[in-house]
Image: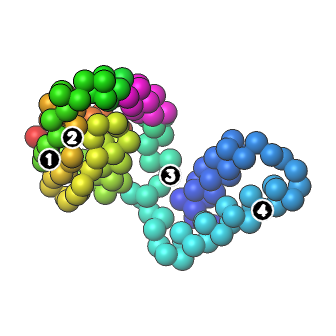
Amino acid sequence: MNRLAFSLTLLLAALWLAVSGVYKPVILALGVASVALVVWLSVRMRVIGVEHNPVLFSWRLPAYWFWLIKRIFWANIQVTRRVFRPDSIKPAVIKVPVPQKTSVGKVTYGNSCTLTPGTVTLRLTREELTAHVLDDESARDLTDGSMAEKICWLEGNTEPKR
């Protein structure tokens, strides 16, 4: 087994153990079987590679998750305010550049946008992200480029293209 498949196996096993919370022999056997099946399918489909290395982002990933959770929390507060003041809702569709270099980075950008309340990714191409935003503040959160820069940092790219 190559090192990328091995790292995927370790990551999936750790995630499964953390999420499952049940450590009975039958459940553990099912966990081993499910991890083995996913790794086998991933190798067979040839989706494991340097760009798809599950430990690609290393220590930066937990830091990014923490940052994203804070963004989600504050965006929830923004959306709640909008619910109580419907006149402040001004939906729009905006386009922002995608500065990430890797496919994983671009998809992370689109998914992070969708996870943040008040924004939904409608389309993601190599060059731009099209998103539906709830109001001007949500639009500003995307157009200021802070999320794009954070994901570039996550990729290890210190100089995002503008």
Vertical side of 52 occupied by 149: above or below: above
Mark 2 falls on what kind of element? strand
Mark 1 falls on what kind of element? strand
Q: In front: 32, or 86?
A: 86
Q: Are marks 1 and 4 in contact (CB under 8 Å)?
A: no
Of the image marks 2 and 4, the number of the one nearer the N terminus: 4
Which secondary structure type mostly characterizes the magenta part of the structure?
Answer: helix
Residue type marked 4: Leu
Mark 4 falls on what kind of element? helix
Task: Identify the mark at residue 133; answer none if there is no mark.
Answer: 2
Vertical side of 118 occupied by 66: above or below: above
Mark 3 or 1, closer to the camera: 1
Mark 1 or 4, closer to the camera: 1
The residue at 21%/46% (across/down) is 132
Residue type marked 2: Val
| Label 4 to label 3: alpha-carbon separation | 22 Å
Q: Are marks 3 and 1 in contact (CB under 8 Å)?
A: no
Outermost bottom residue: 44
Q: Are marks 4 and 3 in contact (CB under 8 Å)?
A: no
Task: Identify the mark at residue 54; answer none if there is no mark.
Answer: 3
Q: Which residue is mark 1?
A: 93
The residue at 49%/33% (across/down) is 62
| Label 3 to label 1: alpha-carbon separation | 33 Å
Mark 3 falls on what kind of element? loop
Q: Which residue is mark 4?
A: 30
